[in-house]
Amino acid sequence: MKVATQEKIAAILANLKTRNVSAVLISDFETGRNKNLRYLSGQPSDAQLLLFADGSTSLVVWDMIVAKQMSEVDRLIDVSDFDRSYRAAVSHALREKLGEEFTLEVLPTEGHFLVLQLQKEFPQAEFICQPDGAADLFIKARSVKSDAEIETLREGANVTNEIIKMIRPFVESNPGLRELDLAIFLENEMKKRGAEGPSFETLVANVDRSGMIHQVPSASEAQLDKPGIGLTDFGLMWKGYATDVTVPMAFGKISADQQKIIDVNREAYDLAIGMLEPGIPAHVVAEAAIGHIKSKGLNMPYGLGHGIGLEVHDPPRLAPKPTDPEMLKYWQETPLLPGMVFTIEPGITSDIGGFRIENDVLMTDSGPEVLTISEPIIFG
């Protein structure tokens, strides 16, 4: 079933009509994933959707069995009927519905070659791609979750919390364990509990690698419980929705500089959580938390957080306001509204290790509700 509510679809269609857009093309393939396909049609992947301004939908698919079970569209088109040519199938659907003259909006992620083919096929049609067009509409729609989406995200968070609670006893009962051992354990526990799998590659890092923003490789043969600060960054997919947490860890004797990293990270996290209230601009929270870390002479080289939903990096984005004039042309202030679900993840990177607390947060009418229970784990 599609995720988008009728109210949100109506707002999207109204915008298309205002801009005289006849249809929007949304594509999802291995070469370029686009969760707007699932959001608007229910089809999980590997298809092309035409959303027409009158509200009707045509879905071009290669797996009709999946489409019949999961999609919610007006018309299913089997690409096999067109010699497995998506271009031919999409052209047929456009011509059948709109004729030769229309305005088709494509998303910035659309394949350039396909657009060129369609332009050649329909010389009288207009093809547009706008920074404030359909892609922006979908971002705004997906940034505020429906009640059903929130319930699914709660379920996923609860499963994630069960696994978080298992980290300490697992590590303590396996002295000398590798980073890989914890990564395998976490992903096995996800599957045991019915998750579809990890929402991204599970990261586990000891003191030698925790200072990286994203570890390469994600988990290694190295001993995890070496003295110093480490972390694991993981999440799971639950009924199509992602969770994302980072659990920081400290092992053995910690230096004064490492303790400062732990303390300042906690201060920045508490500062960010304490600032959250309905309507506060995302960049204000990000600037405060990052500014606190930098004021202590430490480094945080990324944003404060991101939305979670159909993707592990869903809208909105919690990052400082850009200073570059070109970026400012397209920047929009994002208030944190009730129904938004996002991470708060201040982190500090250094050559003596990195430390990051990350939790998933739901903004409600009365303020933030922290859905996950990540806390630093201090091993003696």
Image: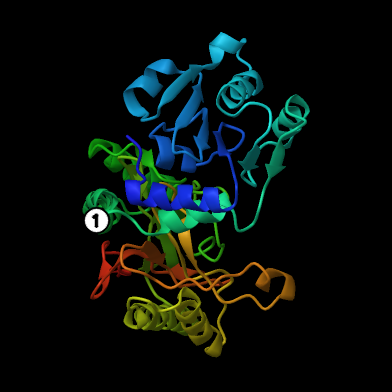
**What type is the residue that disc 1 sits on?**
Asn
Residue 234 image position (x, y, % from top left): 39, 52
Looking at the image, residue 157 lies above or below residue 96: below
Residue 318 image position (x, y, % from top left): 48, 69
Q: Secondary structure at mark 1?
A: helix
Looking at the image, residue 253 lies above or below residue 32: below
| Frontmost residue, 259 versus 35 | 35
Looking at the image, residue 370 lies above or below residue 11: below
Q: Is residue 115 left or right of residue 364?
A: right
Mark 1 burial class by Cα count in 10 Å: few <14, some 14-19, many 20+:
some
| Residue 127 in view of the camera | yes
Question: Which residue lies under the disc numbered 1?
Answer: 161
| Frontmost residue, 23 versus 295 | 23
Looking at the image, residue 73 lies above or below residue 288: above
Q: Is residue 19 left or right of residue 359?
A: right
Residue 111 image position (x, y, % from top left): 68, 36
Residue positioned 54% across, 60% down in the render: 209
| Frontmost residue, 3 versus 298 | 3
